[in-house]
Amino acid sequence: MGMVGGVMAADRQRPNVLVVLIDDMGWEDLSCFGNKDAKTPNLDALAAEGLRFESFYVNSPICSPSRTALMTGQYPQRWKMHSYLNDREDNARRGMANWLDVKAPSVARAMKARGYATGHFGKWHLGGQRDVGDAPLIEEYGFDESLTNFEGLGPRLFGVGDSYDGKPLKWHSLRSESLGRGPVVWMDRAKLTEGYGRSALHFMEDATRRGVPFFVNLWPDDVHSPFFPPEGKRGDGSKRALYLGVLESMDAQLGVVLDRVREPPEWRTNTMVVVCSDNGHELGAGQGGVFRGAKATIYEGGVRSPLIVWAPGLMEEKARGSVNRTSVFSSVDLSVSLRRLAGINVEDDGQVLDGEDVLMTLLGKSEESRKAPLFWRRPPDRKTWAPKLKEIQPDLAVREGEWKLLCEYDGSKAQLFQIEDDPGESRDVAGEHPEQVKRLTEMVVAWHLAMPADRGAELAKERK
């Protein structure tokens, strides 16, 4: 590949990093994770040369807070990012901030200070949406360059879709263009990932020409509803068929980027690519395998995510193409570990992070899990979310070792599962282990009370 010719030898202390965060993709949606209804050959090929993790978690079952955890290395509740960012009125109704505070830790800012070229391409949803036009620009979080969609500010790509089968043309922007703050380009909604990928590749190639390592977010939103697959990928027009169409189309568009990353020795031997989802699947679209629940729930189907780590020049050779089913860690740990990959001493940053360093696990040199428990709090507006599930959602959850406990804000109505033997959370063993129920309930309630409050309790009462 000509763009790397004559460039200095790869900086082994500062590997390149590409983070692909896919919107609303279920645990079983990639064919390498068991999907029999769609083929994702490009992401499968990445997994075949890397590591698949089956016990990876995100720190929220919904968009904005999940992204906050990955960006900061902290629980999103610390920054009042409790659910998806909406307009000002709805954010206030739920006790939320209007955007992620720029004072929050940022993996991009840390990478930039380490000498990385930093770019964000794709969905943002951490501020600058609906009627919130005064949010910080993405660059204020440590990025040199950005290109986003209607869920952010600065340069943006907007999708045009619904122009088939006699439907009128629709412009999918949620009025974001009226906020200004950057140039806008309209393109086919089915090809947005191609647009983001093209810009990301240009950015990475430019950084390499300059002899600078890159840290790049590529965050596609193809598999978030509504779904706009290209011609020939619409099946019978059902929700599931349209979803499978956009899933396969996204894989093909990502393949252009992934093939380029895997080609030149300078990248192949010194780059880590991370692929995961921001939360569980939407009901009727994606699938969560054996896991109970879906997007917006704190059951496993809402917070367990597929994870692929590709770094053939950095990881143990015997680990390539293997599956890690036992190591338990989450997005906040991934955020910290990417910093450590770049040689950043997290302890010197001056901010206490909730994540732990699991870099050796990512590289296949260990199977160590996160040591501290993992905690979740449901989105404040989602107590009765997803009525098709026919159950009221618990407020809090904690996983520690083999145990996962879910309960109300006050610790009542506890459910306890031995999650390693019962990943589907189908057999509540709370009555058999009262000592574990007491210990874990006290632990998760204490965590909840230590976090900034949302309006989940009040909103639940209003719905009754």
Image (tube, rainbow, N blue to C red):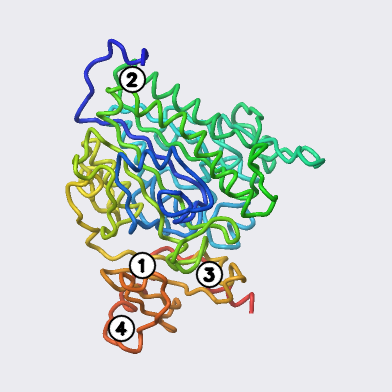
Q: Quadrant of the C terminus?
A: bottom right
Quick check: 49 above or below 434?
above
Please name the residue shown 41% across and 32% down the image.
258
> 173 or 390, which lies in front?
390
Which badge, 4 or 1, is on the more N-terminal residue?
4
Identify the element where label 2 is drawn: helix
Mark in front: 1 vs 2: 2
- Residue labelled with disc 2: 208
> 20 or 364, which lies in front?
364
Please name the residue shown 43% across and 23% down the image.
203
- Residue labelled with disc 1: 450
Mark in front: 1 vs 3: 3
Identify the element where label 4 is drawn: helix
Q: Quadrant of residue 257?
A: top left
Which amino acid does the dot numbered 4 rest on?
Lys
Which amino acid does the dot numbered 3 rest on?
Gly
Mark in front: 4 vs 2: 2
Residue found at the far top of this picture: 6
Calculate the distance from the C-alpha at mark 3 to the C-alpha at mark 2: 47 Å
Quick check: 451 above or below 321?
below
- Residue labelled with disc 3: 456
Calculate the distance from the C-alpha at mark 4 to the C-alpha at mark 1: 18 Å
Which badge, 3 or 4, is on the more N-terminal residue?
4
Calculate the distance from the C-alpha at mark 3 to the C-alpha at mark 4: 23 Å
Calculate the distance from the C-alpha at mark 1 to the C-alpha at mark 3: 15 Å
Which badge, 4 or 2, is on the more N-terminal residue?
2
- Residue labelled with disc 4: 438
Q: Quadrant of residue 400?
A: bottom left
Mark in front: 4 vs 1: 4
Locate residue 209 relative to residue 252 in the image: left or right.
Answer: left
Q: Quadrant of the N terminus?
A: top left
> 168 or 179, which lies in front?
168
